[in-house]
Image (cartoon, helix red, strand yellow):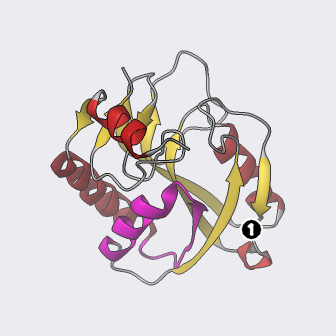
Amino acid sequence: MPNLAEAQGILNSADVLFTAEEVSAAVDRMAAEITEQLSGEYPLVLAVMGGAVVFTGQLLPRLLFPLDFDYVHVSRYGDKTHGGELNWKMAPKEDVRDRVVLVLDDILDEGETMAAIRDKVMEMGAKAFYSGVFANKLIEKTKPIKADYVGIDVPDRYVFGYGMDVRGIWRNLPAIYALK
């Protein structure tokens, strides 16, 4: 974990990719798309901890239909900048059976985490699976899953802010930044 001066240095040297206003507009658009498709389904919404906290907290009040809410906690990153082995800290609960499930995450990077969650939810008997990510990273590699709902596309750079961290910090920023 960086000290205060290092943390401020990371932010000061980063590029702003999307302003807070652009981020908010993207969430508004996503909420409209999700509402149009899922408002009649009474879905179970699962947030992926901890990156999806900021995004989910902003999106849920914009979804003006009944839903159930829970979370999963799985990570491939920890405080590293490259994905590693999948670590389930909290698997989906059994109440996914026969439900339409919408999983929300901060970013679809290589897609391994979301694909694993999809597989687990469907194995547990979900009726349908949808995924929503605030950011979709544009990478060369083919991903094992494509998000149904995407807020923004980000370049193949290390991005942070709005739930996404860099070395464990700056999840709380309202805009999206990229390391140089």
Secondary structure under badge 1? loop
80 horizontally vs 55: left or right: right
Say which residue appears at 68% left-offset and 44% top-offset: 113
133 horizontally vs 90: left or right: left
Residue closer to the observer: 38 or 31: 31
Locate the C terminus by quadrant: top left
- The quadrant holding residue 8 is top left
Q: Residue furthest left?
A: 21
Q: Is residue 139 above or below residue 3?
A: above
164 horizontally vs 97: left or right: left
Q: Amino acid at mark 1?
A: Pro
Q: Residue furthest top?
A: 140
Locate the N terminus by quadrant: top right
Q: Which residue is mark 1?
A: 92
40 magenta-colored: yes
Q: Position of residue 158 (x, y in %)?
A: 46, 28
Q: Which residues are magenta?
A: 39-62
Q: Position of residue 137 (x, y in %)?
A: 46, 31
Q: Position of residue 53 (x, y in %)?
A: 48, 63
Q: Position of residue 36 (x, y in %)?
A: 35, 64
